[in-house]
Amino acid sequence: MAGRYRLNKERNLSRFYILLSIIFVVIMFKWGVPFLMEVIAGKGTIRATQDEDIIPPQSPVLSALPEATNNASLLVEGYTETGAGLELLVNDTVSRSDVALENGFFSMQALLSQGSNRVYVKATDAAGNSSASEVKLVTFDNEPLEITVIHPRDGSEFFGKNSQVIDISGEVSKSEVQAVVNNSFLTVDKDGKFTHRYQLASGDNEIKVVATDKAGNMDEKTIKVLYTP
């Protein structure tokens, strides 16, 4: 009888210890493990929440810009993240500010300085993240271009077969230009000088020289000569 009582008592103790172990494991998983992880990570660690925006807006993409222009006002267009705040910078100074439209498109006017200009756009979202476009170099040059025809002089006369082919020579005030004489291309050297062989027609001949630089500045000179076979 005493043995049976002792056996039941031991069984009850075993069940109690098992239940206690289960409760301990549950408490450890629910509260103990997170507490240990927090201690390991450090109390001062700031953990970013999942909804925190740390991604910068899409880098602005600029439409093609001219290499050079003779207009101080430059139209800058492109696209970026919808609603992003925009700054148009010229030589690292803010020229204009705007906000991207619903489709991300933007259009702003930049004010250029004489010479080479660094042009780019910076976009900033509502969370303060920012990105910048590629830097474009645009030269502003509104200095006039001038052509001087040295030979032949306006009103010159040429006689005989040996004088039918002449040299048209002169110079332009800038070296990097595109030039034509009566729709034939001229070669202009680094000093702005040119020489072109030209065959005269019988009678009056009009010779027109036109030159244009990269910025679009243009000049033209027209002379008339007479050729008698």
Image (spheres, rainbow, N blue to C red):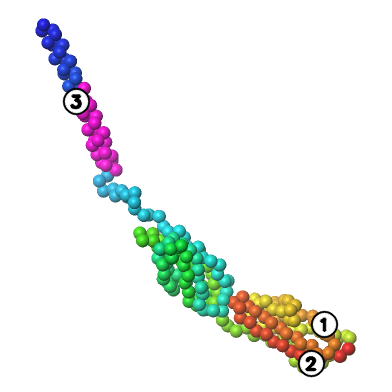
Residue carrying label 2: 156
Q: Are marks 1 and 2 in contact (CB under 8 Å)?
A: no
Of tags 1 and 3, which is closer to the observer?
Answer: 3
Query: Around disc 3, counting alpha carbons within 10 Å, would you say few (fewer than 14), some (14 to 19), or many (20 or more)?
Result: few
Q: Please, what secondary structure does the residue beneath circle 3 have?
A: helix
Q: Mark 3: which amino acid?
A: Leu
Residue 102 disc label: none
Mark sitting earlier along the chain (1/3): 3
Quadrant the C terminus occupies:
bottom right
Q: Where is residue 55 shown, x and y percent of the image? A: 40, 55
Residue 20 disc label: 3
Q: Mark 2: which amino acid?
A: Ser
Quadrant the N terminus occupies:
top left
Q: Which residues are magenta?
A: 18-41
Decide if residue 133 is in sight here: no
Judge whether residue 84 is colored magenta.
no
Judged from this view, the residue extending furthest toward the left is 2
Q: Which residue is at the front of the view, 19 or 35?
A: 19
Residue 106's place in the image compared with 170, above or below, is above
Q: Where is residue 182 shown, x and y percent of the image? A: 75, 81
Q: Are marks 3 and 2 in contact (CB under 8 Å)?
A: no
Residue 199 disc label: 1
Q: In the visual, does 203 lie left or right of 18?
A: right
Q: Which residue occupies 69% across, 82% down?
A: 210
Give the overall secondary structure of the magenta segment.
helix
